[in-house]
Image (cartoon, rainbow, N blue to C red):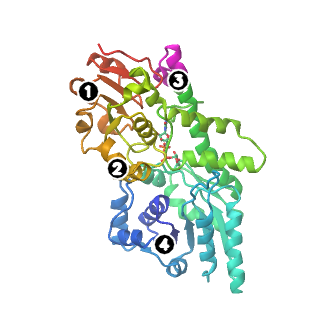
Amino acid sequence: MKITVIGSGYVGLVSGACFADVGNNVLCLDVDERKINMLNNGEIPIHEPGLEGMVVRNAEAGRLKFSTSYDVAVEHAEVIFLAVGTPPDEDGSADLQYILAAARSIGQRITKPVVVVDKSTVPVGTADKVRAAIGEEVAKRGVNVSFSVVSNPEFLKEGAALDDFMKPDRIVVGGDDAGALKLMRQLYAPFSRNHEKFVAMDVRSAELTKYAANAMLATRISFMNELANLAELLGADIESVRLGIGMDPRIGSQFLYPGMGYGGSCFPKDVKALVKTAADNDQTLHILTATELVNENQKNVLFNKLVRFYGGVENLRGKTIGLWGLSFKPNTDDMREAPSLVLIRNLFAAGASVRAYDPVASKEALRVLTLEHGAEKLQASLEIVGKAGDAVQGADVLVLVTEWKEFRTPDFNDLAQVLRDKAVFDGRNIYDPEVVATAGLRYEGIGRIGKAGA
Ligand code: UDX
């Protein structure tokens, strides 16, 4: 099939590459010329395991092309995916200007029937707006050309996006045009071969499904974070509780991990957007409002532990905190809404400095932190180093923020030698408190019984 993907960001690029990989003829469009030049040179603007190889392989085979020209992109396609950004507005609602601009650009050019697919995460009712925008432009030209708009939300996890696309749990498509749904079913047949994964529904239900899934997952995380804080007060271990409830198949074991709060490009934005959508319809989503509040508080949880450990915020002044992990989760360089940003902000405000290491997010972290704090402040208070071991050299304590694989089994005896104040703060509960304490280090996790160094 001939496919155009508008927006060569994270979702667009992954979708385009995967469709090309199963034999489709794909053209990815972006208005950012620099990005398209990079892609044409085989450079990938984002970090996603496996993506570079897949893009290069399909580009070389001639199945994947990149362009900045709407004329070329619209002419090319039987199916056009809209995968442009929908950043949050100031009030939390999704900003639709890019998606509607793309829709108008399509309407100004189509000459043959086409299916337009909303892939971006968009509020319920957006497909109708996209349809209207294309229709208006078509009417202005006085031509007679048919088109359909369907909704096909993505459920990709950063760091595992190729796998999620190639082996999806479900493929949700909303539309009211039988022909368009049939075409979508054909397009997704290679990803749904052994088990039927395709779920067809009306457009609004498909749009709401995306928000419902992310809101449910975010709520599970906030629930566990709140329970973890209670477990600490009660002298219980949330890790045992997690195992104990996760074995109930009605609950399931995934997304029950307490931590420093969820970050990333989806959960925070989608929870806010759904709360706003409800408010626009005179409804208060009480549970989701609490989910968001709990998450904001949770991002401070390790800082509060540091303050307690040092017996007051004033005692953090002049301390050097070793940080492992900066990205919002492993296997990505994405810093959006990363809990590390809140921790660093708190530490700077307390007069502490930071020595940080991240396997891939250093450059992106530096960019984001410079925007927030300015180069001068960073010069004075932050050092981003190239090895995990260098982040603890000269540090007073270690704080584990992101659970990258290479942090899983450090030599705690070595850490006990270098960390001046002999303590490890484990923001993802990846260490065994006994093992850490045996090496002579104080252990603090999330929702666990703290252990003094033996
Ligand atoms: C999420 C959804 O999983 C995906 O389906 C959707 O398409 C986009 O949003 P992503 O943001 O890439 O994907 O990351 P995910 O792995 O879901 O993690 C989100 C955040 O939740 C991270 O900050 C992670 O650390 C946190 N998290 C996740 C927890 O704190 N505990 C958990 O048990 C799981």
Q: Answer with left or right where residue 176 lies relative to residue 336.
A: right
> Dot 1 surroundings within 10 Å: few (below 14), some, or many (20 or more)?
many
- Disc sitting over residue 83 in the figure: none
Q: CA distance from mark 3 to mark 4?
A: 46 Å
The amino acid marked with disc number 2 is: Glu
Which residue is found at the position 44% from the left and 17% from the top?
A: 449
Q: Answer with left or right where residue 306 lies relative to residue 386.
A: right
Dot 1 or dot 4: first in sequence order is: 4
Q: Answer with left or right where residue 356 lies relative to residue 135.
A: left
> Dot 2 surroundings within 10 Å: few (below 14), some, or many (20 or more)?
few
Q: Nearer the viewer, residue 215 or 173?
A: 215
Q: Residue beneath label 4, please?
A: 31
Q: CA distance from mark 2 to mark 3?
A: 36 Å
Residues drawn in magenta: 229-243
Q: CA distance from mark 4 to mark 2?
A: 34 Å
Q: Residue beneath label 1, please?
A: 419
Task: Provide residue 30's location: percent of width, then percent of height.
Answer: 48, 70
The reply to whether the C-beta atoms of the residues labelled 1 and 4 are less than 8 Å apart is: no
Dot 3 or dot 4: first in sequence order is: 4
Task: Provide residue 77's location: percent of width, then percent of height.
Answer: 54, 75
